[in-house]
Amino acid sequence: MKFSQTSRRALYLGISCVLGTLSSQLAAQTNSEAVDYSQASNWLCRPDNPRACAVDMSTTIVNADGQTRLEPWSDNPLAPVDCFYVYPTVSQDATANSDMIAGPEEFNVVRSQFARLGSQCRTFAPLYRQITLTALRAGMSGQGNLTPDRELGYNDVLNAWNYYLENHNDGRGVVLIGHSQGAGVLSRLIANEVEGSPVQEQIISAMILGSNVQVPEGELVGGTFKELPLCERGDQLGCVIAYASFRSDVPPPPSALFGRGGQGTVAACTNPAQLAKGSNDLHAYLSNAAAEGFSSTGPSPWTTNGTAIHTPFVSVPGLLSGECVSRNGFSYLEITVNADPDDNRTDVIAGDVMNPDGTVNAGWGLHLIDANVAMGDLETIVKRQAQAYSRR
């Protein structure tokens, strides 16, 4: 079974994981003016100005027999807990660090990775001056003289976090979510500002996706985080969910960055499907369109019977399963497409990262859809954890 392929531009999005690693390597402090996070325009999502989270999240469920049904969605502005999200490398600004004006790419990634959680939590997503795709392209090609400030984005997120705590949190529990560059920034924030501080008691969980969270082999805590353990149950509080996804027939090659262990440590893998429901069947929410801003292919037809699907998301029950595996020095979430060529549903799922020559870059795995493959499970986990937090 093959996945459909994204284009060479998607390669640069996948490469954003490098920045999750590099974000821990400190650079000189910038003199740039601090962002004023009291201004709602400096947030992609905030309850008083939801912006990127105020979107249509409706889904068409496509069963194996090709039959479809609509699944509506609505947010919950009265949710009892909060979610704080740091997005991955998506900015296509011409500078090395992005500006504070949101483009289609920032709105799209929020819709893909975060807005759905608004059914269970109030949503907070700050804009930040991240390292751009432009800087990554220049660095890869060896052309240009763009030198990103690796402290700038972290300091922005830190300021946004502090503003949120002082002005919006009011003692509420909070789920932290980050992917790729955002996961690296968030990991640093947790280590520096959360662990060992009073606010740690309010951390419902941290979802660190598409990055390498290190733990000593056989242990649940240590390495990247000194106090927050990996989650073992879907209703556990104060724990970490972390994984990087690869498809079952393209495991990470020796050169892969995702899933790689360190000296005396392994990359953490927590299976969100197991945490949500004790099964390996993933509850995916897959995009029904190619991402704006990237020359990626759109999805293949979802059925063989010609059914037109117009919702922004598609769910394919039973098609994808995930299992945490450890092989050849890598630990990762192995994604299997349970294809049946005789049924009326597609067996082709988009998500591969491509090299400039058009071949699959196996080292990045399914980085582009790390969140999508388990978004329904992550939503369920937030619901269960919020219920557990309310019983404290």
Image (cartoon, rainbow, N blue to C red):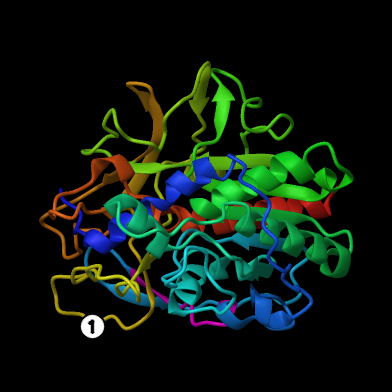
Q: Is residue 21 above or below residue 227?
A: below
Percent x, y of residue 96: 47, 63
According to the image, label 1 marks what residue?
Answer: 308
Residue type at tag 1:
Ala
Does residue 172 appear left or right of residue 305 in this picture? right
Does residue 289 appear left or right of residue 187 in this picture? left
Percent x, y of residue 18: 44, 45
Q: Pointer 1: residues within 10 angstroms few (<14), some, or many (20+)?
A: few
Percent x, y of residue 293: 35, 74
- Highlighted range, magenta: 53-61
- Along the viewing direction, whichever of 119 and 4 lies nearer the viewer: 4
Does residue 216 appear left or right of residue 46 in this picture? left
Q: Would residue 49 be seen by someone viewing this image from the given angle? A: yes
- Along the viewing direction, whichever of 273 and 370 lies nearer the viewer: 370
- Along the viewing direction, whichever of 215 and 156 lies nearer the viewer: 156
Task: Examine the image and state in which quarter residue 38 appears.
Answer: bottom right
Q: Looking at the image, which residue is at 73% across and 56% down?
A: 158
Q: Secondary structure at mark 1?
A: loop
Does residue 308 appear left or right of residue 43 in this picture? left
